[in-house]
Amino acid sequence: MAFGLFKKKDQTQPAAKAGTDDTGSHYHDLKVKNIIQETKDAISIVFEQPSKKISYKSGQFLTLIVPVAGKEVRRAYSLCSSPFVDTDLAVSVKRVEKGLMSNWLPDHLKVGDTLKVMEPMGQFTTEYSSGNKRHLIMFAGGSGITPMMSIIKSLLTQEPDSICSLIYCNRDIDSIIFKNQFEVLQTQYEGRLHVIHILDNAPMNWQGLSGLLNKEMLTKLFERIPGCGLEKTTYLMCGPEGMMKNVETLLAEHQIPREKIFKESFVAGVLDKPRKDDQPAAEKKTRDVTIRYDGQEHVIAVPHNKTILETALDQGIDLPYSCQSGLCTACRGKALSGQVKLDEEEGLSKSERAEGYVLTCVGHPMTDDVVIEIG
């Protein structure tokens, strides 16, 4: 009996190339079909599928590209739609304080507008089979529910013998994204979907859990959730970094094997984040890098204080990228020769790094013979 697994952090998996059109373009112009106000500070944007439909997997993300204040801004948003259930594509966006894109979209986007997007990408995915019999236990916080919603809908419809337990943490009851949808799904798939809400600030009549997810609370939750610890139980998490680190610690204390735990990180761009500058003075020099992408070869001179991606974009070379934080892997390429230093390695597994994969958005050439192949 097949047991589909999410992509492990120590597995080498190519970035998804779903959705390229006949010209090989990695971009699409999508029309906004609907905008749904999920909560006071969160919306879902529904896009019409183009005539040549875009294929994707539950758990993947779209990169939205919007001109804001005269500058092109890119942000990755997970798809909340399911390729098995929904006709259209949908992403959810939650306002972030001082967030450039997360505030521009709800303030300016209208039904009928067209947005430029990159093809679906991401490895927080699994394959579905009607013969599977597994249990997914999910931990989500805030907008981290977005990919979980897509995965839940796909699991419930494609695997009739599989079940899902969702532990969803929010600030208050009005912050729960998809609250009504989950109530409908729990009724429709009674016994197969179990949603447990945890609120930081619970109302007086709240019957559920409140406060921070701690060891004692998790122990009680595991007593309530059927099948915890079984061989075919997989644990997923997506939300604030602090929440996920806490959950990882708690799962370790419950002796859950690391190979059964998978996470998706949501981060803002870190272009302004101070970079480590531990290079010896003698190595701080400009180095040539050869980039092979879409059948073309580009040679760029990369200064020691700039990344490979920054330099390429400055020279008008349209390389793929999204988060610019070294986590989403949209800019991933393989170093065929030379050495590349990464400011952030979280996005790549050990085996990927061993095979020469690098991330151009946080990569710096350390030798003069760097050749990177993308795509």
Image (cartoon, rainbow, N blue to C red):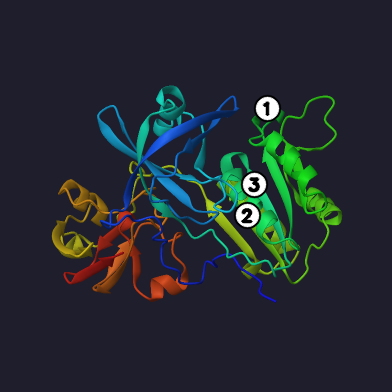
Q: Looking at the image, tell me whether mark 1 or mark 3 is earlier in sequence order.
A: 3
- Element type at marker 2? helix
Asked if residue 245 can be seen in this view, the reply is: no
Q: Is residue 166 left or right of residue 350?
A: right
Three-letter code, disc 3:
Ala
Q: Is residue 68 left or right of residue 182?
A: left
Quarter of the rendering occupied by the N terminus: bottom right
Residue 77, percent across and down? 47, 43
Q: Looking at the image, tell me whether mark 1 or mark 2 is earlier in sequence order.
A: 2
> Which residue matches tag 1?
174
Q: Looking at the image, tell me whether mark 3 or mark 2 is earlier in sequence order.
A: 3
The foreground one among 125 and 52 is: 52
- Element type at marker 3? strand
- Element type at marker 1? helix
- The crowd level at tag 2 (other Cα within 10 Å; few <14, some 14-19, many 20+) is many
Label 1 to label 2, Cα distance in Å? 26 Å
* Callouts 1 and 2 close, C-beta under 8 Å: no
Three-letter code, disc 1:
Asp
Asked if residue 339 can be seen in this view, the reply is: yes
Which of the 4 image quadrants contains residue 16?
A: bottom left
* Callouts 3 and 2 close, C-beta under 8 Å: no
The foreground one among 298 and 272 is: 298
Residue 340, percent across and down? 28, 66
Residue 140, label in figure: 3
Label 1 to label 3, Cα distance in Å? 16 Å
Which of the 4 image quadrants contains residue 255?
A: bottom right
Three-letter code, disc 2:
Ser
Taking the spot 44% from the left edge, 23% from the top edge, the residue there is: 107
Taking the spot 41% from the left edge, 67% from the top edge, the residue there is: 14
- The crowd level at tag 1 (other Cα within 10 Å; few <14, some 14-19, many 20+) is few
Residue 154, label in figure: 2
